[in-house]
Amino acid sequence: ASTAEYRPPKLSMFVAVLSARDRTTHRDALRRSWLRTSLEQRPADGSTWDYGFFVRAGQCAPGHCLKMSQQPMRGDVVTLQVDDTYDRLSSKVLRMLQWVTETVDCNVILKVDEDTWVDALATAEALKHVTAASAFYGGRLAHEYPVLREGVWKVSRKDLPSVNHSDYALGGAYALSRSTAQQAVMTLYAGHTPMIANVEDVTISLAVRAAG
């Protein structure tokens, strides 16, 4: 199916799973585990949810880029015109959130990593009070976590001069209302907050804070 065909009815929650193009076996493992278990059960309150894996299609040539909402979804895999490298992770998450907000009519977007186990029904139940227009952002918060200057998660003083991060939801899993995700996407594209390439959870948290 293409994104033009992917128009589900109103969803309570859409689970956006970060993946990579060559990680087919990892996606299959999730389809056989928590995704299968959750999809086989029907929520008692009638709420609905769906999911998609997000992988790269590679950078497009200038003048040949598809609009975000036209980037294809085949089965349960969405291919985005981005790189899959860790030092471009924030750009990938930004485009993933943009794709969901432009394509899926949902109340909540739950961003998860491949190595995160999710009880989708329980999560949807816990978040059923969140509407698409709500100002909502949450997850497992990192409190006064030090800003690292070396290693995989290093951040430059230019981007973040402070010693500690502001509280942010750890990247393994966090939820945003559709409205909050839209505002974060617009904030980042406008350059109002830094795009910290290798620290996507902090990047999204800063954008959410700035958007109010």
Image: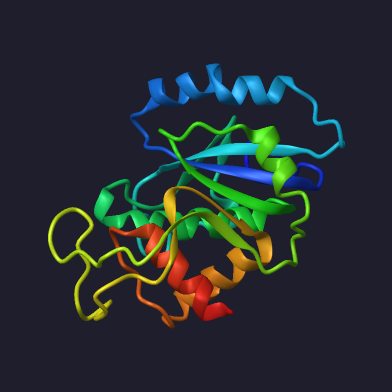
Between residues 208 and 164, which one lies in front from this camera angle?
164
Residue 58 at x, y percent in the picture: 34, 47
Between residues 123 and 100, which one lies in front from this camera angle?
123
Residue 65 at x, y percent in the picture: 45, 59
Q: Is residue 45 above or below residue 109?
A: above
Residue plotted at (20% across, 64% down): 148
- Picture quarter containing residue 76? top right
Between residues 104 and 6, which one lies in front from this camera angle?
104
| Extreme residue toward the right, this view | 45
- Picture quarter containing residue 156? bottom left
Residue plotted at (74% across, 57% down): 130
Q: Is residue 92 left or right of residue 88?
A: right
Q: Is residue 130 left or right of residue 93?
A: right
Q: Quadrant of the C terminus?
A: bottom right
Q: Is residue 68 visible?
A: no
| Extreme residue toward the left, this view | 150
Residue plotted at (67% across, 69% down): 135
Between residues 44 and 25, which one lies in front from this camera angle?
44
Q: Is residue 161 left or right of residue 51?
A: left
Q: Is residue 96 above or below residue 78?
A: below
Residue 186 at x, y percent in the picture: 54, 74
Residue 134 at x, y percent in the picture: 73, 66
| Extreme residue toward the top, this view | 32
Q: How many marks?
A: 0
Q: Quadrant of the N terminus?
A: top right
Residue plotted at (24% across, 75% down): 163
Q: Is residue 131 left or right of residue 189?
A: right
Q: Is residue 88 visible?
A: yes
Q: Is residue 27 above or below residue 160?
A: above
